[in-house]
Amino acid sequence: MSNISIPFLSLKDVTALHGEEIREAACRVVESGWYLQGKENEQFERHYADYIGTRHCIGCGNGLDALIWIYRAYIELGIMRPGDEVIVPANTYIASILAITENGLKAVLVEPDPRTLELDDSRVEEAITDRTRSILLVHLYGRCACTEKILALCQKYNLKLVEDNAQAHGCAYRGRHTGSLGDAAGHSFYPGKNLGALGDGGAVTTDDGELAACIRALANYGSQKKYVFKYRGRNSRLDEIQAAILDIKLRYLDEDNRARQRVAALYYDNLDNPLITLPARLPDDNNVYHLFPILCHRRDELQRYLADHGVQTQIHYPIPAHLQECYQGEWERLCLPITETLAREELSLPMGPAIQEDDILLIIKLINQFR
């Protein structure tokens, strides 16, 4: 066993990159005596909306809630109703699908493109029916999933394009940030994300003022005015400390993403093992490398080999949503061979803005020696 220890992602090291400013921001909130729905939230929401390129940003409790509120608001506004269908990539974290089914909508799973690992736009139109109301586009692993064909299909069939931008803060498509490409987008600020808080947090971005007002109310018990409840909402708010910390980290997001892109370039330029397949390399504008996934037929063996040499890796995701117990019976006899292959073969390598180049080169050497 090796004494080398390379973590998958050291949140302590990531926080230390901007540690002094983060501590100052947290102390400022503590000393202010105002801990919810205050100036820190207002400032972060304004700055993040400006960064993403939308008119509105609404902070909420987490990324799952952000997606739930988008679809709940569409139902409250009469744009959708329970039983309507939402097309979603089958290869995604389960939160994308939970947000759909939580609202009584039907998730229609579509396979990914095995080269990009994102929603296969050549398979989308055949999944559209007269009940389809939306496409939930997931920018998985930090890779832009948007294509001209998907945008055209949304226009052709009058579908709401909702983005799951939980893993792609700072990613862009043709000069526009993901999170501004469709009708609304959900964002997660889970600590390990490219823009991560020191706890849970999330947000919705949109240009739709009516939708924004509805979402803000839904996430505040359903209230737009104190003790007056228009909707049956819930409590899902971004607290002031997290907002203040996120506002600090937002200033450095592009810089931190460039550090991730440098790590990815080392992987792409130097990994050379016939047992390993890399997803198609995208221009840096289109990939902020929340994760660096590779594929290997002997994935579990490779993971053990790396662990024996002190390298921590993770699997995203070992059981696809349609095979999870919570959805037993939801998609009877559904065959998704590409998604199931990815679940068997995907392995995520260490990635982040604080990881050292020497560590990456060692990982590359170990993988190239794997037989």
Image (cartoon, helix red, strand yellow):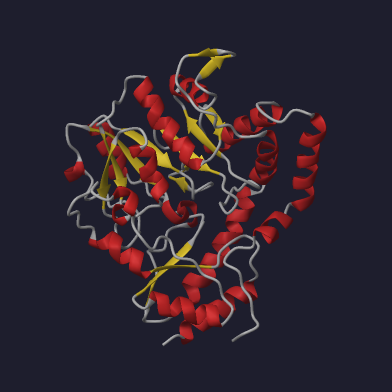
Vertical placement of residue 152 versus 74, above or below:
below
Residue placed most toward the observer, 226 or 154: 226
Q: Is residue 351 left or right of residue 333?
A: right
- Would residue 125 be visible to someone looking at this image? yes
Q: Residue furthest right?
A: 31
Asked where in the image residue 184 lies, by quadrant, the reply is top left
Is the N terminus in the top left, top right, bottom left or bottom right quadrant? bottom right
15 horizontally vs 133: left or right: right
Q: How many marks?
A: 0
Of 296 and 353, the residue lying toward us: 296
Give the residue drawn at x 61%, y 34%: 238
Where does residue 282 sit, x and y in percent of width and height? 42, 59
Residue at 33% in and 76% down: 297
Q: Is residue 34 left or right of residue 302?
A: right
The residue under the point 56% across, 75% down is: 311
Q: Would you say residue 180 is visible in this rendering? A: no
